[in-house]
Image (cartoon, rainbow, N blue to C red):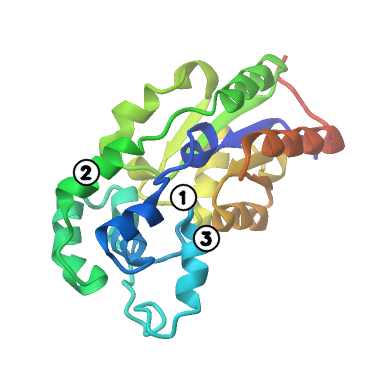
Amino acid sequence: MTISTVIFDFGGVISSPLFVGIGAFEEAEGYPKGSLLRLLFGDTSYIGVEGRAVADAIAADPDSAEQQGEVEDEPDWHLLEKGQLDMATYFERMVEKAPRVIGVPIDMEAYGRFWRQTAPGVHWTVVHKMRDLKARGLRIGLLTNNVREFGENWRAMFPIDELCEEVVDSSHVGMRKPDREIYELTCARMNIAPSEAVFLDDNAENVAAARAFGMDAVQVLEPEAALAELESILERRGTRTTS
């Protein structure tokens, strides 16, 4: 089946990668390697920037909390992204868990500075590609794991209403990638079959889940290379446009 729709993730795809420098921040604060990643996200499979390298290091450490089975069944970060936890409660729980996970109380003032200093920017090459694809008659959607309290800020970073026909935000629909249900919902909202879509995401698990659902998918590690791969897929599969 030809491609009618291209669906983009936000963080790490339209925006620059999240939490750049988390390893350096851990080291500067004296936290064990990978412990802040576990505290923030509940596991080490989260891929922002350094997540993959940190996850590999922890997987090889027999003394790590994850290796010993000390992992949350449903991480607070997942609940936050599904809109089942507000940000204030998330931070309260993070402070409470910090001594157990990182070995000491977390310095929230230092973490706040780190968070502000690493705020993501925009991959304008991706935004321009979205505009180009839409001008060529392809439909554009957005599927993001996000936090409700972040919505006003991230939606103002690029012309989302101009470019995206449909926006599926995990914190508004109560489900998140890589769960199959959110891909089903996205396709249902756009009234397409999975095989009509190409999905771009920076997280390997999310890309694998999209492919398992029947989408073509591209993992975004470097924007220009990912957009070239997207164009290769469109050329190979062919497109069905709305114009």
- The answer to whether residue 86 shows anywhere in this view is no
Residue 82 location in percent, x, y?
Answer: 33, 50
Three-letter code for the amino acid on which mark 2 is drawn: Gly
Residue 3 location in percent, x, y?
Answer: 75, 34
Any mark on residue 52, and which?
3
User: Which residue does the numbered mark 1 point to in the structure image?
Assistant: 48
The secondary structure type at the circle numbered 2 is helix
Alpha-carbon span between mark 1 and mark 2? 18 Å
Is 241 in front, or is 68? 68
Any mark on residue 112, and which?
2
CB under 8 Å between callouts 3 and 1? no
- Crowd tier of the residue under label 1, counting other residues whose Cα lies within 10 Å: few below 14, some 14–19, many 20 or above: some
Alpha-carbon span between mark 2 and mark 3? 23 Å
Please identify the quarter of the rendering in which residue 124 is found: top right
- The answer to whether residue 156 shows anywhere in this view is yes
Indicate which label's residue lies in the foreground, 1 or 2: 2
Please identify the quarter of the rendering in which residue 200 is found: top right
